[in-house]
Image (cartoon, rainbow, N blue to C red):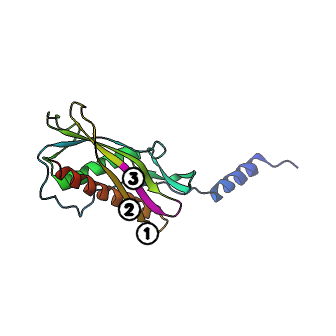
Amino acid sequence: MKMPPVLMLMASLSFLGCTHSTPTRYYLLSVARELQPLPSASSAPVMLRQLRLPEYLDRTEIVRRRSVNELGISDNHLWGEKLGVATATTLERNLAQLLGDKTLLFAGRHSVPANCRCLNVVLHQFEADADNVFNADGYCYLEKANGAELSLLLRVSHSQPLADDSVGALVDAYNDALADIAKQIAAALTALP
């Protein structure tokens, strides 16, 4: 017996009505509110020239480690912008709170003076592991505005257990890591002659 087209259409529509997709949620990184300006900020201006993340993290999808060699990429939990852009912007704003707007220059908004020190940050790890511990590890290099004399400023690291396994706890850990890394960088910069 052949099913009439109207019944076939109704059956298809009722089946589609039973399925639902999880709504997509978007997340942003935020500037740390508790950062206080350092008392002895360096007099030489500094500009964040670049921040590099591992390629697998620099995307809009939120990535979590499932094991040492396996990544989980979320379809419905997304960053509001690529993680590399969000990380650089948040780190830059955290550094501005610590160093002051006169010391930290923003790329694209200021011309680069000859005595400017350019900061390059390379994060080799910037994620939560399979045990729900957030780890950040990398290096900061300084160079003169003309690109000469690249030198290691410091190694940065941060580690903290996540409050729980939610995406919100992961986002909080990203924010905490960026505040801590900014403190480490600012302290090293203010110690320079």
Residue 3 x %, y %: 81, 49
Instruction: Give residue 25's position: percent from left, percent from top.
Output: 46, 56
Whether residue 15 appears in magenta in the rendering, the answer is no
Labels 3 and 2: the sequence-earlier one: 3
Which callout, 1 or 3, points at the residue further toward the start of the chain? Answer: 3
Looking at the image, residue 87 sits to the left or right of residue 21; the answer is left
Q: Amino acid at mark 1?
A: Ala
The label shown at residue 28 is none
Give whichever of discs 1 and 2 has the lower sequence position: 1
Residue, disc 1: 163
Q: Amino acid at mark 2?
A: Asp
Amino acid residing under circle 3? Asp
Report helix, strand or loop for mark 3.
Answer: strand
Please name whichever residue, 84 or 38, is drawn nearer the observer in this view of the structure.
38
Residue denoted by label 3: 137
Give the magenta part as a residue range: 130-138
The front one of 136 and 96 is 136
**Residue beneath disc 2:** 172
